[in-house]
Image: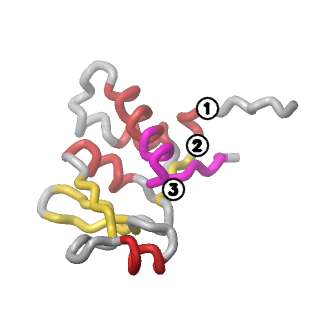
Amino acid sequence: MATKEKINLLEVIPCRNEHIKAEREGETIVLSFPRFKRSWMSRYLLPKGMSKDIHVRLEEHGTAVWELIDGQRTVREIIEKLADHFQREAGYESRISTYLTQLQKDGFIKWIMNN
């Protein structure tokens, strides 16, 4: 039985998944990704007039986090860079960690282990 290795979330590097497109609309970013994994599925299963992509509009804080995900910075570095944006409010570090974890679970980003 394989044991799951514990990782320190602060030391991993979040990296955007290549199938996610990001476009700035005003002050926020809209993420889009294909509704179906295979192109033929959208041809046969997509109702007329419906977009082939799913769009997710990030709010102000989500946009600030997304813009710092560059495949180079660790979670710790992102948290440090956003201290002023969040006005150093209590618990902002865990909010960012939780948000990044959710982005990873939803397939928007992947983790790179920082060796």
* Image spot of residue 111 (x, y percent): 58, 48
Q: Amino acid at mark 3?
A: Cys
Out of 71 and 2, give the one closest to the viewer: 2
Relative to 19, residue 60 above or below: above
Distance of mark 2 from mark 1, alpha carbons? 7 Å
Residue located beneath label 1 in the image: 8
- Seen at 45% across and 59% down, the residue is 70
Dividing the picture into quarters, in which one does residue 96 lie?
top left
Q: Residue at x 23, y 39 (%)?
A: 85
| Residue type (three-letter) at the residue carrying disc 2 | Val
Residue located beneath label 3 in the image: 15
Amino acid tagged 1:
Asn
Cα–Cα span, label 1 and label 3: 16 Å
Position in image of residue 7 (x %, y %): 65, 33
Residue situated furthest right in the rendering: 1
Indicate whether 6 appears above or below 108: above
Front-most of residues 92 and 33 = 33
CA distance separating discs 3 and 2 = 10 Å
**Does the magenta-highlighted stretch encompass residue 108?**
yes
Q: Which residue is mark 2?
A: 12
| 50 displayed left or right of 35 | left
Q: What is the span of residues highlighted in magenta in the rendered image?
A: 102-114
Residue under the image location 33 percent in, 21 percent down: 91
Give the camera-side residue of 100 and 43: 43
In the image: residue 49, left or right of residue 101: left
Upstream in sequence: badge 1 or badge 3: 1
Q: Disc 3 vs disc 2: Cβ atoms closer than 8 Å?
A: no
